[in-house]
Amino acid sequence: MSLFSENSNFVDSLDMSGVSAPVFGFPLGSNGKSTATPINKELQSFPEKSVYAENLISEEFIKDEKKIRLDRFKLQSSVYKLLPYSSTAKCLRFRQDKQTEVAVFRSKKYGTTHYKGLQTCSSVWACPVCSAKISERRRLEVLDAITQHKENDKEVLLLTLTNPHTKNDDLKLMAKAQSKAMGLFTGCRAVRSIYSNIGYIGGIRAWEVTHGEANGWHPHFHILLFVDKGVDTDDLQNKLYKQWANACHLSGLDKPSIEHGVKVDKGDKAADYVAKWGLDYEVTKGHIKKAKGKGRTPFDLLRMYSNDNDAHAGALFVEFVTAFSGKRQLYWSAGLKDFFDINDLKDKEVTSEEENEDEDVEWMGSFTPAGWKFILKNDLRGEVLELARDSWESVEMMLVAFSHGENTEHLTY
């Protein structure tokens, strides 16, 4: 049983009036807080016309944010069932070692809560909790780079590269071929010459995947090109198409059409693309945001398995994780982070920031080994963090509610 279930309103029934709003800048995931990398001050406020800015003080918005955070833990529990031997199955579930206690801390500044003493997987592909935090951190970094580039009177273009795909394509093989095609494309002398002529200083590449009933898996690339102003995007698109089509052919992929294989959009589209990282239901990006239209992201598939017991969707999610495990989801060209003075943190460092940060936090309470087993058995990890935003007494009230009359004093301290 979970407090997230439709039949339970336990969390909402408690008095949460003392809880700070869950978001004071950009949302950083269910157990995240502020970033450690210095980000331009202008990025600390919400983008204009942001859904978050309009609803920051809305009670319904705060309630939706709570639901999103709880949903991530629910989905992560589904990964535990689908991939029981993966690192994600242990994430925020297994203790770091047998001697480590599971404790909950609350930020005095933000009112957010997080666990300490648990293992994390740092998987952007498989973990709903870690990927949300990592993706939001990456979004801030990308926004920082875009802002600096525009301040230098330059422009950022959005390049999208794709190739034909069918329902019968093997995702792992297609990903391998795409990786080869991308290497040929970026290493091509002709492409380097094209980039040189438009003032290219570097790019940021995201590898995204959706799945459709009709045409199966659709992995594709989005690349932010940092260039001079005034680039003829139609001319650039035509020139890059020839190189991408050749790279696909040499890699064993079908030749992409000129209509769909390559698309170059101007700066406003690039800004919109990045701004939507974090502004969708999952408050994340790419492979984890809820897909629009017919395509389903891998996390849509996981949600279908979790909510609807859709075994086929679960099998597809496993196929996706198996195919992309170990691959880089976001890639910055060499030297670009240094150029914009952005700290180069690895995914593992991002997810472990809370363990090492200097931010003023307060200890809310800890679980005994028996208490943590109780939390796992009842799938209440997300609910603990939500209630601890109010008080540790709220967490203990929940334990009593789920204990069926048994004594719960031995579960916490």
Image (tube, grey):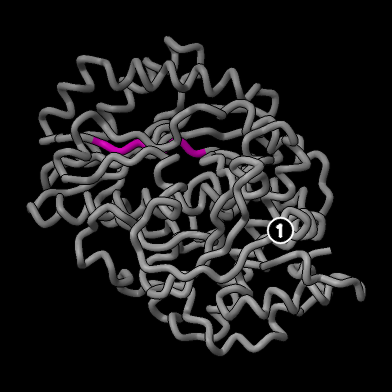
State the residue position of label 1: 368
Q: Secondary structure at mark 1?
A: loop
Residue under the image location 45 percent in, 28 percent down:
257
The answer to which of 354 and 79 lies nearer the viewer is 354
Crowd tier of the residue under label 1, counting other residues whose Cα lies within 10 Å: few below 14, some 14–19, many 20 or above? some
Which amino acid does the dot numbered 1 rest on? Thr
Q: Residue at x 24, y 52 (%)?
A: 267
Residue 123 horizontal/vertical position (percent): 54, 39
Magenta stretch bounds: 203-208
Q: Give the camera-side residue of 363 and 395.
A: 363
Q: Is residue 151 above or below residue 237?
A: below
Q: Which of the image's four quarters has the C terminus? A: bottom right
User: Which of the 4 image quarters holds residue 346?
Assistant: top left
Q: Residue at x 53, y 23 (%)?
A: 175
Location of residue 364 (image quadrant) = bottom right
Instruction: Say whether residue 376 is left or right of residue 244.
Output: right
Residue 386, position as x, y percentages in the image: 61, 71
Point 70% across, 78% down: residue: 11
The image shows residue 158, relative to residue 51, as above or below, that is: above
